[in-house]
Image: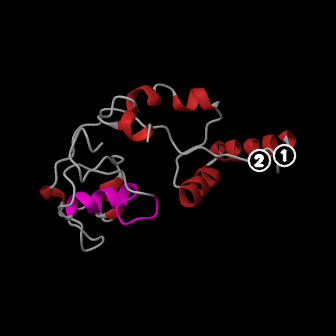
Amino acid sequence: MTTFFHADSEIPEGGTQYSGYSGAMKCMMTGHGDVALVKDTAYRLYCDENEDGVADGPDWCLERDEIVMLPSFGQAPSHPVMYDPARMDDETMLVIQEALLALDDDSEGREILNDVLNTAGMVASTGEEHLGTYSDAVSNVPGIQAYLEK
């Protein structure tokens, strides 16, 4: 990152003020960064809960017309559900997986998914299916290879 952009460029550590989607937005909106890589729903979630274009989030949020949202150019995989096979057997994992997938079957289950997990649904997949071409896309981020080789 630092060799591609400049010496002060960095990928923030988790838990620091500029980590995560809200941190990326805060970094950009307070003038510490030029670009924030976020989900298309991030502005609404963190800065405009009423969806009226008026910032009603933290004081660092800019008004909607003060930022430029670029068209989506890719899709990141969703957050996976993971388990520790040393602590959970395959049978228990399958019972939990089926229970989570069954939440998609009716409106009450979908409401639980939305309210508790902030997702519209669950899909069973392998790690390879889940990541798809995402790792190829990430490998094209300027400076990422040098950062990962540190």
Residue located 49% across and 37% down the image: 77
Q: Is residue 5 magenta?
A: no
Q: Which of 67 and 36 is in front in this view?
A: 36
Q: What residue type is labelled 2?
A: Ile
Q: Looking at the image, how many numbered discs can be counted on the residues?
A: 2
Compared to residue 143, the image places residue 10 above or below, namely below
Question: Is 27 on the left or on the right of 122, as rendered?
Answer: left
Dot 1 and dot 2 residues touching (CB under 8 Å): yes
Q: Does the magenta stretch include residue 23?
A: yes
Residue located 58% across and 27% down the image: 129
Q: Where is residue 54 in the image (x, y as percent from the top left)?
A: 20, 66
Compared to residue 126, the image places residue 89 above or below, namely below
Range of residues picked out in magenta: 14-29
Question: Is 70 on the left or on the right of 43, as rendered?
Answer: left
Q: Where is residue 27 in the image (x, y as percent from the top left)?
A: 26, 60
Compared to residue 37, the image places residue 32 above or below, namely below
Q: State the SS at label 2.
A: helix
Q: What residue type is labelled 1?
A: Thr
- Quarter of the image where the C terminus is located: top left
Question: Is 130 on the left or on the right of 75, as rendered?
Answer: right
Callout 2 crowding tier (Cα within 10 Å): few <14, some 14–19, many ≥20: few
Measure the alpha-carbon separation of dots 1 and 2: 6 Å
Q: State the SS at label 1.
A: helix
Q: Position of residue 18 (x, y in %)?
A: 34, 61
Q: Where is residue 53 in the image (x, y as percent from the top left)?
A: 20, 60
**Tag 2 residue:** 96
**Tag 1 residue:** 92
